[in-house]
Image (cartoon, helix red, strand yellow):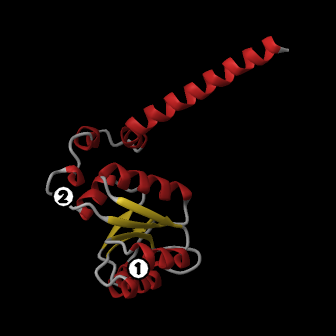
Amino acid sequence: IHRHHRELSIRVAAAVFAALLALSILERYAVSIYYIFAGNFTHLETFNKKLPAQSANAKLRKVLIIDDSHFYLGLIQFFMDYAGHTSKTAQTADEAITIAGEFVPDAALLNVELPDMDGFSLARALRSTCPHIFLIGITGRFDEEKFRQSREAGINHHVMKPIDPLVLFKLLA
């Protein structure tokens, strides 16, 4: 039994080591992997150079990310952390309003198609809590009516999914 436990311990330790190694590789190269899967090889060289938020005179921002997708929350938060910004996430409009009151973000990236409240109403609510907030609307599809509603709600800029992190960095610089 002791030999069996020892072999099992060695296998578990090897698996843990392999997982930690994979995570460290992913953390180091995740942005490049993202661009490769997105089929956008031209951005790799540009992205791996000094990022706008990492330059000496760049302003690091407090960013609130609001999306009902775990994938996009994690991806955008990774990009914000990579650029040196401080970020918090919310999956619902109610959660976003609560966090905004405590966190007081400089900017918010918000999905304009949330299930519990449309992004336009959320934009108005965030503006009432944080009057100087820079709002970036995120959407998978966009038409003239949504564009008009966004302007009326005070959304400053829009990005389409899939999100290009370099665009976000430039908007937040």
Cα separation between marks 2 and 1: 32 Å
List x then y, in percent, for residue 81.
37, 52
Q: Amino acid at mark 2?
A: Ala
Q: Residue at position x 45%, y 52% from top? A: 75
Asked whether 91 or 166 is in front, the reply is 91
Q: Quadrant of the C terminus?
A: bottom left
Residue 64 sits above or below residue 125 on the image: above
List x then y, in percent, for residue 154.
33, 83
Q: Amino acid at mark 1?
A: Lys
List x then y, in percent, for residue 49.
21, 40
* Marks 2 and 1 in Cβ contact (< 8 Å): no
Residue 43 sits above or below residue 21 on the image: below
Task: Categorize mark 1 by other alpha carbons within 10 Å: few (<14), some (14-19), many (20+).
Answer: some
List x then y, in percent, for residue 167.
28, 58
Asked whether 114 or 129 is in front, the reply is 129
Rendered image: mark on residue 58: 2
- Tag 1 secondary structure: helix
- Which residue is denoted by mark 1 in the rendering? 146
- Tag 2 secondary structure: loop
Q: Quadrant of residue 94?
A: bottom right
User: Which residue extends farthest right?
Assistant: 1
